[in-house]
Each structure stands twice: as structure tokens, then as C-alpha cells.
Image (cartoon, grey):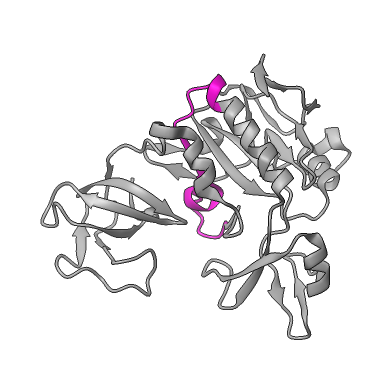
Amino acid sequence: MKVTDHRIEPIWYRETSNLSAGKVLDPTIIVMHYTTGWSGTGSRDWLMGAAGGTSNRGSSAHVVVNRDGTAWQIAPFNRVAWHAGPSRYGALKGLNNHAVGIEFVNPGPLSPDGSGRYADGYGNRRTEGDLDEFGGYVSAPHSRVGSQVYAWPLYTEAQLATGRSIVEALTAGYDIRAIVSHEEVDTRGWKTDPGPAFPMESFRALLGEDHDDVPLMEVTATRLNIRGGPGTQYEKLDPPGSIASADVVEVLSSEGVWRYVEVKSGGGAGTRGWVHGAYLG
């Protein structure tokens, strides 16, 4: 695959109606999403808005990748699509203005209903046999969804192979500095895509040495707990326990909304630990 004139050859192309008028995109980030749908063409048409014959006027993306490996490009890469919503990565805010959005067809987390079936976010239910036929799933909790252990349908090998080819074309055609999940850049606190079934690190590795080139960041909270692992179940590091507003940290890696950092200033300078990314700016 190759980017020519802000389109990837040779995949299908038709333009969504849901684009920002007059805004030019020079992408430096790729944001990974799931569609929250089971149907590839249904998800594609929804994200195309009026051009897809649907009532959707609020969301779009650049590429949709179906479970059989088929890809559809629905926006040129120099146009601003509506996929990231309120978002932040490092010093960049509003990632629609900085990022290409890739949607992988996947329903997202499914809740066990107590009768042996699993419900998606719209109330559609599937049996375990249905999920096995769909490609299988992993079980994992997620605090952004609720207190249960959820089923997360797997992505197919064909789907992931196409996704990697698209990312390779984008990194060859643009100065892509980071590949991120929607969850880790979402500032509302409820997005989870592409979820624990998605091999995020294998996609980040496609950047090679440019992997996650995040600038130094400042603590925006009055006090920010620094922990031994990526979650509130991990104990605070003692010392320092917490770091203060305007302390500078370097982000070394990410896991969901959590950032593994090295503190560069303040009383905790030199400490390495995990902090919640929502309180860095």
C-alpha cells in the first residue's frame, strides 16, 4: 500500500459527509478505534453520514477496516475527520486537528447478562457460541465500563494485517510521531477503544525509534499520586507518595489512561512510577 494524493492505493474510496470545512490536516498521530458495531458495511455507512445514507451527522474517520481484511477509506488524510472528540496527547489538544482515525470493526465490551449471553452497548445479545464463531474473545475488567469482567471480541488476523499495512503506508507518507488508543487520549473518561483485545504495542512498534515521541509534561493537579503500577489498586510510592502541581515529568510508556513517568523536577525528581494521564498537560 502507498499514500498518493492523501489516499491509499489501492483500497476503496468514497468521501464521508462528516468533515470539517476549510480545515487542512497535516497528520502527526494515528488514533486507533473500534466501531462498536458488528457489521462492516453498516459501520462504514454510518461513519459516512449522509453520503452513506444514514442520519449520522456527528462522527467520521479516515479508514474503516473490516473483519475480513477489507478496508474502506472515507476521508483523505489531509482533511479533518471527527473521530477523537475531546482529547489530548502531550501538548496537543483536540486531536481531530492532528490525527488520522482508523476504525476497526469490533463491537467493543460485552456484558454478561447472567443467562449465558453477552450484551453489547446497544442491548444486542450473543451466546458464547456466537462469539466463538465471530472469532473468539478475551475476558477482562475495565473500570471505565463498570465493575464486571467483560468479553472483548478478538480482532481477526486479516483485519490486523490490513491495519498494519495501512499504518506502514501512513508512516512512510507523513511525519507520524505517535500511534495511540482512543482511550488514552480521551479527556472525558469513558472511551475504551480499541480495548484489551487489540495488540496496541505491535502497532506502536511500527514507528521504530520514533515510538511515542511525547514531550515533557507538567502536573496539572494540585497533588498527583504516583503509584507502583497502572491503576488505583497499586500502592503509592513512598517516598514521595505524590508529586505537585507544575512538577515536570517525562512519559516513558503508556498503558490505557496510565503513564509511566520519570519525575524531572520537584521533591520527587528521579522517581519513576505510574500516574493518571488526565492530570498531565
Does the magenta portion include 24?
A: no
Question: Looking at the image, can residue 99 be seen?
Answer: yes
Which quarter of the image is occupied by the N terminus? top right
What's the residue at 72%, 51% (across, down)?
156
Within the image, what quadrant is residue 124 found in?
A: bottom right
**Left or right: 28 as drawn, with respect to 210:** right
What's the residue at 44%, 56% (across, down)?
257
Q: Residue furthest right?
A: 53
Residue 40 position within the rendered picture, expressed as x and y whole percent measured from the top left: 81, 46
Q: Residue furthest top?
A: 5
User: In the rendered picture of this protein, how many numbered marks are placed on residues?
Assistant: 0
Within the image, what quadrant is residue 51 found in?
A: top right
> In the picture shown, does residue 9 fall above or below 161?
above
Q: Residue furthest bottom?
A: 114
Residue 272 position within the rendered picture, expressed as x and y whole percent measured from the top left: 23, 56
Question: Magenta residues, as a range?
Answer: 171-191
Q: Residue furthest left?
A: 267
Pick the front one: 236 or 65: 65
What's the residue at 32%, 47% (across, down)?
252
Which quarter of the image is occupied by the C terminus? top left
Residue 52 position within the rendered picture, expressed as x and y whole percent measured from the top left: 85, 37
Does the magenta portion include 187?
A: yes
Pick the front one: 122 or 135: 135
Pick the front one: 203 or 272: 203
Question: Looking at the image, can residue 55 be seen?
Answer: no
**Left or right: 249 as drawn, with respect to 87:** left
**Left or right: 106 as drawn, with respect to 99:** right
Residue 161 position within the rendered picture, expressed as x and y whole percent measured from the top left: 67, 40
> In the picture shown, does residue 56 fall above or below 258?
above
